[in-house]
Amino acid sequence: MSDAESVRLDRWLHVARAFKTRSQASRACALGRVRVNGARVKAHRALRIGDRVEIELRDWKRLLVVRKLADRPVPKALALELYIDESPPRPERDPSHHAKTPAARRDPGAGRPTKRDRRKIERLTR
């Protein structure tokens, strides 16, 4: 744990296991998906005890209240002590959400797709 008064937001989000990597935390901040006390912030924002951190994920909004500061990785049990989780329950995912699109069809013997063909296929399957 850190005895400092403040810690960089992206470091704390990574240590608190809100994101798997610090770069993912930084990117979320850059895209405006992280708010501290209601304001959109950058990754270098100094986080203090008592701050309310809102994280927008795909289908869920997390609300974390900072209890402790840490800037170095800690065991998972200690990471859970860094914040109070006031998030609503995570919504259940639709089982059909994971259904994949069918593979693109090619004539037998046509060989591998060229780079141009592959890009056309990718555009169609998005």
Image (cartoon, helix red, strand yellow):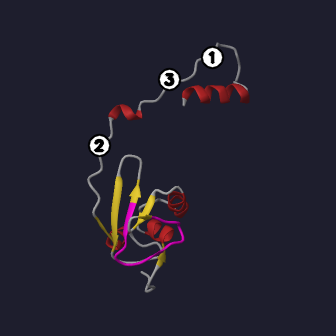
The amino acid sitting under disc 3 is Pro
Q: Which residue is mark 1?
A: 106
- Disc nearer the start of the sequence (3/2): 2
SS at circle 1: loop
On screen, 99 above or below 27?
A: above
Q: Position of residue 61 (x, y in %)?
A: 35, 54
Tell me the amino acid under the disc marked 2. Glu
| Quadrant containing the C terminus in the rendered view | top right
- Work out whether residue 1 or residue 94 is closer to the camera in this orientation and state it: 94
Q: Name the residue: 45% across, 66% down.
A: 13
Residue 50 is left or right of residue 4, and the answer is left
Q: Is residue 115 rendered to the left or right of residue 82?
A: right
Residue 13 magenta: no
- The front one of 111 and 124 is 124
Mark 3 lies on residue: 102
Q: Is 101 placed above or below 11 here?
A: above
Dot label at residue 10:
none
Residue that badge 2 annotates: 92
Direction front: furthest residue: 39
x, y percent for residue 92: 29, 43
Mark 2 or 1, which is nearer the eye?
2
Which residues fall within the magenta stretch?
Answer: 40-54
Q: Of helix, strand and loop, which one carries label 2? A: loop
Taking depth in this image into account, of 105 and 34 the one nearest to the observer is: 34
Q: Residue at x 53, y 66 (%)?
A: 42
Q: Residue furthest bottom?
A: 3
Q: Quadrant of residue 76?
A: bottom left
Give the percent coordinates (x, y) of residue 48. 41, 78
Residue 44 on the magenta segment: yes
Query: Tag 1 or tag 2, which sits nearer the N-term?
Result: 2
Residue 32: x percent and y percent?
49, 57
